Structures are given as C-alpha cells and as structure tokens.
Image (cartoon, rainbow, N blue to C red):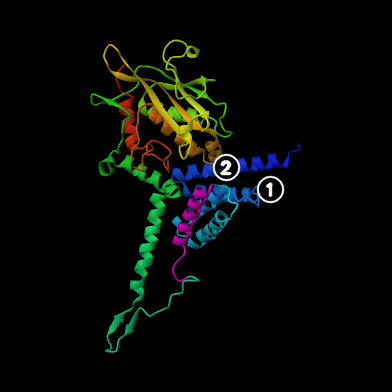
Amino acid sequence: MWRARGEDRDDRRDTAAELLDAASAAIESGRRDDAQPLLEGLLKVMRLPGVTRSDRPDPLLVTALTMLGALHLEAGRRADAKGYLVEAVGIASQPGFDRSAKEAALLRTRSQALLDACTPRGEPGVPVRERSPVSASSTGRPRRSRRSSRRWPAVLAFTAIVFFWMFATTSGQNLVAPAVVKLRFAMPALFGDGGYTFLASQDGQPVTFSSCRQLRVVINDDLRPKGAENLVEQAVAEVADDTGLEMYVAGSTDEPASLERPPVQARYGAGWAPILVVWTTPDVIPALRGSPIGRGGPQSVTDQATGRRYYATGQVFLDAPAITRLVREGRRSTVRAIVTHELGHVVGLGHVGSPFELMQKKVNGMRHFGPGDKKGLTRLGHGPCL
C-alpha cells in the first residue's frame, strides 16, 4: 500500500515512543536488562532515514541516549555510558533542539552531569602525574604519596554528582524511586508508613465522599491525544482499589470544561453530577498555564440536617497540548501518573513534600501511589455513609 512519507515517519515515531514506554516500565519494575535492548531498538528506529529531521534535533532521541547512558553507568560500563552521553549532550546543545529553552537547558544539564560522572580524572584534557605509592624521604623513611589524598576530591565530587542525579533529577528519580518505595512497603517499621495530607477536614476528620455511594466518572475526550487511550480508565481503577470506593468510568460526555460547574445537571438525571475528566487547553482553563499539566479537585456541599460537609462531585482538567508532547516522547506512564495524581485530589488528598509519594507537588519518577498516599486513601474511602 502506498504511504505518504510523513505518515511513514509518524508510524516509526509511534513505534519509537512505544519502545521508550516499554523501557520505562521495565526500569520501574526493576528489569534493567530488559530495558537496554528496548532502548537500543528505539535508537535503530530513530536513526532510520526520515525519522529524525536534521534541522530539528529530537528530544525522544536524547531521552533514550540519556537513559542508556544511565543504565550503563549504573552497571559499571563507564566507557559505553560515555559514548551515549556524549551524543546526548551534543544533540541537546544544538540550536534547533525541539524544546523550550528552559527544558533544553535542564536536559543538557542532566546529560552533562551523567557524562561528568563517567569521565574519570586523568583522561585527555585532565592530565594526572603518576607517582609511586611509597617513596623514600631524605631520611630514608618511607613517606605516603600525595596521590591517594588527591583522589578524595574526585571521589567526593563523583558521589555528589551521583546523589544529585539520583534525587534531584527526573531521570534519577525514575530509577531510584521505585526501589525506595519497594523498601518502604516491605519494611514499614524501618522506613515508616509515609505521610499524607487532606484537602479539607472537619472536627478532626477528613471531608470525604459518601462511602456507600457509587462514584461515576465521565470523560470528555474530544481533545484526547492520540496514544492516550485508556489512561484515565487505568487511573480510576487504581484510585478505586486504594480507597475501596465503588468508582468507575460510566462513559463519555460532551460537557465542556468550566470553573463554574453545577453539581446537579439535567443531562445526568437525578442526583449529583458524575466526576468529570476533560481534555482541554490553557486558553479555556487559565490555571493550566505554566508548568501544571493537570488540575483536579472535589466540590463539597453541606448536609443541612447534620451540618457535616461532604464531597458531591469533582473534576479533572488535563492540558491536551502538553500531554500530546509527552505521549510523542513515549511517556505514557508519566501521563497516567498525572491523571492518577489529580484523581487523588478529587477524592480528597493534598500535596506532600516527600519525593517518594505520588502526591508530591511534581510527578517525578513515581508512577503509582506510595505508602503514605495509600494510607490517606484508605481513610478517605472509609468516611461516613451519607
């Protein structure tokens, strides 16, 4: 069948994005050996004729090269790591790199930090004079060489770079966070249960949905990006499992995004309107401008008989243009985490400071709820039956 060149390029990029998504999932589950061939296959696809434009270096290629460099560095294959990272830094430094100036600078910094970590002192450009470990002094007694003392700054610098990469960068947290969370789940007595916060409380108890009510979710997917199918459904299922609430996707809707959403609407029949998840743009929802990619939260009402507040419905706004870019880069798992995070807000969770909970302010590395998140969700799912 005849295909336009642009369509063939898009299909190959979709294949590359799927390979990156699979590699990310392998890394998250601790299967490093499975991730490497997937990333190498991605590079082969990206280097096919016409896939990557020479005048616009591709962030998907830089991401794959950086991940491969990180895996090789983690395995002690420093020379292999350097080859990938040199190429990543070179591409990310080109004027036509297809990202904003801030994002391009951050990706260059991450790649360069890893490259510095795998470049030992003494390679070309940083000469080191060789000395004997033990030499004789004028008195004939052996004296210690200065070489060993000179190693400590390099060792400390290397350690600092590795720790910075592990805990202060997205790629580092992608590798570290799942392992840390597994330890916390396995040994809560040693690592603690993790923290959580609630969006609202009353009389010392969190405001919740009625624990005996079905929570319907409807999706306006008119602007849903290609490749983002089923992500909302998966996120809803995770929230339902961790809260114990009967929460499910009831279908699609044409209800538009609005900050002034009525909690009761004729289009949905009697009772409270279902929770709405809508793909939209920052032009419609100004709160999405800047760095937020999603916004979510509940709508509360007050029971006139008891004076108790409870949640009646809620909504999630998803920035369709920003998420389109993430999907094209193969970061479906990141998008799913964003949707899950925002649904966590809908049922009542607030932000936490720990980088090893999904409800941290920025989703970096975590793909599922952490121990503290789960503890808070359990409380939110066992509120009063109203």
Q: Compared with residue 266, is residue 43 higher up or lower down, i.e. above or below?
A: below
- Quarter of the image where one finds residue 248: top left
Q: CA distance from mark 2 to mark 1?
A: 16 Å
Say which element carries label 2.
helix
Image quadrant in which the N terminus is located? top right
In front here: 15 or 153? 153
Of 224 and 190, nearer the camera is: 224
- Residue occupying the far left of the picture: 203
Q: Which residues are magenta?
A: 100-122
Task: Say left or right for 108 vs 299.
Answer: right
Give the residue type at disc 1: Gly
88 falls in the magenta region: no
Q: Describe the element under mark 1 as helix, strand or loop.
A: loop
The tag earlier along the polypeptide, 2 or 1, is 2
Eyeballing the image, is 154 above or below 10? Answer: below
- Farthest residue in the right direction? 2
Name the residue that disc number 1 marks. Answer: 50
Taking the image as shown, residue 159 lies to the left or right of residue 279, namely: left
